[in-house]
Image (spheres, grey):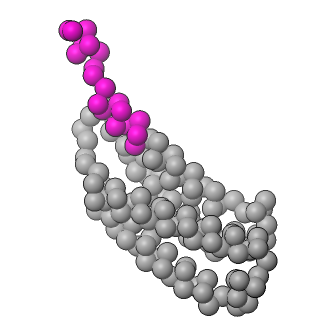
Amino acid sequence: MRRMHLLVGLLSIVAFLITGFLMSVHVPALSESDPELRLLYRSRHVYLMFAGAANVLLGLYVEESSSKSRLLRRVASALLLVSPALAVFAFAHDPRAGTLAQAGPGSLSAFAVFGGTLLFLLAEASARAPSRSARSRT
């Protein structure tokens, strides 16, 4: 799973650089565009960076676990692995929606990163918690 996170993270960072370039050559210039449109592009661009960074860190530091928290870790990994794809889709889709109220996929990307992070936190807390048999012996 580490390699998958690292690969997705690195590809996401490359996509982040590409979306930054696309914003710099946007016609008309985004600085002259409607502020809401500019916000949609920039926020989706930043979501991609966060999703990529989270995956790179997991690729570098996450360790496989054979503990009772394995299922939580797998769900967390799935959320974090899909989040960059949601951000790229949102970068292409949400500005065309025209308004923040009609834009949706970008929020899904942010919530996937947040949810995956929380699930990893719960999995780690669960793995470190003493088992019932260990508590009853003391």
- Looking at the magenta stretch, what is its main secondary structure? helix
Where's the C terminus, which quadrant?
top left
Instruction: Point out the stretch of residues depicted in magenta.
Output: 120-138
Specify the quadrant of the image occupied by residue 59. bottom left
Q: From the viewer's perspective, tell me whether residue 20 is left or right of residue 27.
A: left
- All told, the count of numbered labels is 0
Identify the residue at horizontal 64%, vertical 61% (top origin). Answer: 105
Identify the residue at horizontal 22%, vertical 16% (top origin). Answer: 134
121 inside magenta stretch: yes
Specify the quadrant of the image occupied by residue 81. bottom left
50 inside magenta stretch: no
Q: Is residue 31 visible?
A: yes
Question: In the picture shown, does residue 117 fall above or below 39?
Answer: above
Where's the N terminus, which quadrant?
bottom left
Q: From the viewer's perspective, tell me whether residue 92 is left or right of residue 138.
A: right
Residue 49 at x, y = what percent?
A: 49, 67
Question: In the picture shown, does residue 27 fall above or below 38?
Answer: below
Q: From the viewer's perspective, tell me whether residue 71 is left or right of residue 63.
A: right
**Towards the viewer: 70 or 118:** 118
